[in-house]
Image (cartoon, helix red, strand yellow):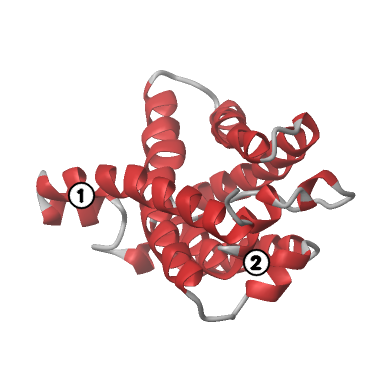
Amino acid sequence: MLSSEKKAGFILTAIAASEGTWVYFSLAGGQQRFWRYMGFSNPWGAGAFGWVLALLCTAFFVWSAMRLPSVRKHLIRLSWLKVLGLAVAGSAGLCEEAIFRKWLMDLLMKHGWLLPLQIGASALLFRLAHAVWGFFQGSLVTALRAMLATSILGLMLALVYVASHRILAPCIVAHFVTNLLIEPGLVLAAVRGEMSGKTFAAAA
């Protein structure tokens, strides 16, 4: 039977590989266009308020995730799992923010959706995408808690995107730093059943 560390390693590898593949092919389509789309050609155009809001979003979600013992233990602990967590942080920060914030919200805006509906749709779909965390432990409670927490994170990141004048860079940085700190602790918490307890935190 696999240990929780090995299970977490497989999960982190799968996430990094799948979302990293998206990043690879997006970069292959043109590096300048890719980084411009991600908002890094003019990151300061997001304004001070957007960056401060991104910082607050990161601090709040990391603080909430630290209620999980595995997250606290692995917050700054160097290990082979932390290296995989770094890969997940980079790939998820780029892939998920490009899809759930910029692509989705800009598409809805183009089709005439009001801003509150754009934000709500972004949070909802982000929430549904993270229901998979419940399957790591085979727990409906874990899935529901993960969906609740990620809907709040998705809502906060959507607000950061709007506050940043629809420049994506602050959202990506916030997502990256959040995952960098809470992984691999979050995956370990999922496979160990820690998310079934009375805690707010869940996957980013």
Q: Amino acid at mark 2?
A: Leu
Give x and y (percent) for residue 127: 62, 34
Give x and y (percent) for residue 137: 69, 40
Q: Secondary structure at mark 2?
A: helix
Residue at 63 percent across and 42 percent down: it is: 155
- Residue carrying label 1: 24
Q: Which numbered tag is attached to residue 180?
A: none
Residue at 72 percent across and 45 percent down: it is: 149
Above-or-below relation of 34 to 81:
above
Above-or-below relation of 133 to 3:
above
| Residue positioned most to the top | 111
Above-or-below relation of 117 to 151:
above
Could you tell whether 121 is left or right of 166 in the image?
right
- Residue carrying label 2: 56
Residue at 61 percent across and 29 percent down: it is: 124
User: Could one spot residue 116 in this view of the protein?
Assistant: yes
Disc 2 crowd, CA 10 A, few/some/many (<14, 14-19, 20+): some
